[in-house]
Image (cartoon, rainbow, N blue to C red):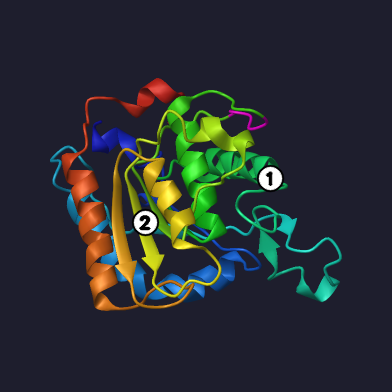
């Protein structure tokens, strides 16, 4: 896939990465959690893409932090509305995720209006949603109530921190055939929100998952080992991926 036509839209200052927040949070909150990783991720992406001599100069990488449009609670107080959002409602991962189809449709619209995007980084429910988006972009057709209505090309990678796969039978075909987009899956050792078995279910729904276990709770790890592992994953994905397919096959991108 030629990188000079892949990652930069006309007039865009550089490649873009979509960042999806967790349950009961917002894009702004995730930005606060992940600002520390931006410089090293940016440098890794630029270095990897510039290895192709046909790639125009890249000076920056854009990180986009949209908030979901679905309030966390049905009876949510108006004062909470700007920082309490979710991509789906549900009490556990084996029940239907209410609202997830609309959230995915909103993300498709965001991709079309602001993309193309190189990959998605998500935390918790945002990571789960990122994997669903990656699956649909690969399969190129609607699944159950998930409408495939975008020309955006498949993603190059997904970073899923404390992510999981939905277990209800409604979502079986999202994960079968398995997701082929490379996934970096970070699992916390003391996660009381997402069981390790639920995260490993995402691993088992993928053909290409890099596992990273870290000591800590349900959060984005901030240590150097995590950051180095993450950037090495991105570097490997961008360096070894098959580049024969051109994004021109996917519409105006």
188 or 29, which is in the foreground?
188
Residue interval drawn in magenta: 145-149
Residue named by callout 2: 185
Q: Position of residue 205 (x, y in %)?
A: 41, 40
Residue 227, above or below 180: below
Q: Residue at x 28, y 25 (%)?
A: 245
238 or 186, which is in the foreground?
186
Report which quarter residue 35 is drawn in.
bottom left
Q: Position of residue 76 (x, y in %)?
A: 82, 68
Q: Position of residue 229 (x, y in %)?
A: 23, 64
Query: Mark 1 or mark 2: which is in front?
Result: 1
Q: Quadrant of the C terminus?
A: top left
Secondary structure under badge 1?
Answer: loop
Residue 171, above or below 246: below
21 or 43, which is in the foreground?
21
Q: Position of residue 105 (x, y in %)?
A: 64, 39
Secondary structure under badge 2?
Answer: strand
């Amino acid at each position: 896939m030629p990188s000079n036509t892949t990652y930069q839209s006309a007039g865009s200052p550089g490649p873009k990465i979509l960042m999806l927040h967790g349950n009961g949070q917002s894009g702004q909150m995730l930005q606060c959690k992940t600002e520390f990783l931006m410089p090293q991720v940016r440098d890794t992406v630029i270095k990897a893409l510039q290895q192709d001599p046909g790639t125009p100069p890249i000076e920056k990488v854009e990180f986009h932090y949209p908030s979901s449009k679905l309030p966390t609670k049905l009876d949510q107080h108006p004062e909470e509305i700007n920082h309490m959002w979710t991509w789906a409602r549900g009490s556990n991962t084996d029940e239907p995720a209410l609202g997830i189809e609309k959230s995915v449709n909103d993300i498709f619209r965001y991709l079309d209006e602001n993309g193309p995007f190189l990959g998605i980084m998500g935390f918790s429910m945002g990571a789960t949603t990122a994997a669903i988006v990656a699956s649909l972009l690969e399969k190129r057709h609607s699944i159950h109530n998930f409408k495939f209505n975008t020309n955006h090309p498949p993603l190059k990678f997904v970073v899923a921190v404390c992510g999981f796969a939905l277990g209800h039978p409604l979502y079986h075909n999202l994960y079968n055939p398995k997701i082929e987009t490379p996934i970096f899956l970070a699992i916390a050792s003391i996660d009381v929100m997402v069981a390790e078995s639920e995260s490993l279910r995402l691993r088992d729904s993928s053909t290409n998952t890099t596992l990273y276990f870290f000591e800590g709770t349900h959060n984005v790890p901030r240590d150097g080992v995590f950051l180095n592992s993450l950037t090495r994953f991105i570097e490997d994905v961008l360096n070894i991926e098959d580049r024969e397919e051109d994004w021109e096959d996917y519409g105006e991108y």
